[in-house]
Image (spheres, helix red, strand yellow):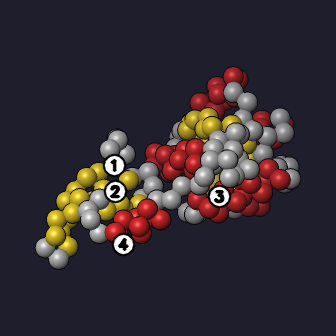
């Protein structure tokens, strides 16, 4: 078990079972002998088959200042078979990354630790890179730039919904 899991022992009907909670996925897996619970847990932690997504092989820039959300986004990117660039918690880090990295698409939180990510979005759009704003601090009509390659996905949002929005903006 890696840095991302917490172990604890639980008891159900007098039976000791080991449980783990994966902080990156938020899924509980029973490692005892209860097959029904194991099957349910496996379904909750199911991953997207790499290559099954239009995002497979893409370089995806991730700008997010909340650690748990950033880890979830990185997992989503990797689960889609894409390569994450980041996560970056600051606009300045994104600026530096854009000097040497060439993302195919970006997921941007609006409010980062040192400011708003609109200038990063503008630079990306100028390069023809699609952007998905993933934020709880923005409404869709705030962005006045190119609507064809910019989408909005509010927080909180299910990973499947965010994947759908990312794939949709790529299809344009």
Instruction: Determine which residue is flagged by label 2.
Output: 21
Q: Residues within 10 Å of mark 3 (few under 14, many from 20)?
A: many
Q: Residues within 10 Å of mark 1 (few under 14, many from 20)?
A: some
Tell me the distance, in whole angstroms, between the alpha carbons under discs 1 and 4: 22 Å
The answer to the question of whether label 1 and label 2 lie on touching residues, with beta carbons closer than 8 A, is yes
Q: Residue 80: where, in percent of width, then height?
A: 63, 49
Instruction: Determine which residue is flagged by label 4.
Output: 36
Closer to viewer: mark 3 or mark 4 = 4
Closer to viewer: mark 4 or mark 2 = 4
The answer to the question of whether label 1 and label 4 lie on touching residues, with beta carbons closer than 8 A, is no
Secondary element type, mark 1? strand
Name the outermost residue toward the top.
Answer: 100
Secondary element type, mark 2? strand
The residue positioned 77% from the left and 61% from the top of the image is 141
Q: Earlier in the sequence, mark 3 or mark 1?
A: 1
160 relative to 114, above or below: below
Instruction: Determine which residue is flagged by label 3.
Output: 162
The answer to the question of whether label 4 and label 2 lie on touching residues, with beta carbons closer than 8 A, is no
Instruction: Determine which residue is flagged by label 1.
Output: 5
Q: Is residue 69 visible?
A: yes
Tell me the distance, in whole angstroms, between the alpha carbons under discs 4 and 2: 17 Å
Q: Residue 135: where, in percent of width, then height?
A: 61, 55
44 relative to 129, above or below: below
Q: Residues within 10 Å of mark 2 (few under 14, many from 20)?
A: some
């Amino acid at each position: 078990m890696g840095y991302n899991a917490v172990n604890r022992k639980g008891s159900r009907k007098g039976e000791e079972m080991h449980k783990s909670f994966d902080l990156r996925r938020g899924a509980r897996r029973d490692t005892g002998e209860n097959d029904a619970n194991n099957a349910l847990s496996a379904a909750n932690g199911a991953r997207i088959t790499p290559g099954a997504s239009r995002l497979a092989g893409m370089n995806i820039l991730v700008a997010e200042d909340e650690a748990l959300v950033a880890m979830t986004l990185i997992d989503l990117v990797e689960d889609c078979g894409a390569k994450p660039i980041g996560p970056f918690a600051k606009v300045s880090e994104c600026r530096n990354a854009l000097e040497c990295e060439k993302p195919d698409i970006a997921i941007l939180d609006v409010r980062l630790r040192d400011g708003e990510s609109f200038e990063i979005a503008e630079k990306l759009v100028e390069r023809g890179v699609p952007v998905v704003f993933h934020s709880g601090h923005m409404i869709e009509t705030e962005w006045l730039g190119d609507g064809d390659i910019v989408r909005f996905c509010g927080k909180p949002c299910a990973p499947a919904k965010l994947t759908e929005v990312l794939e949709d903006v790529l299809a344009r």
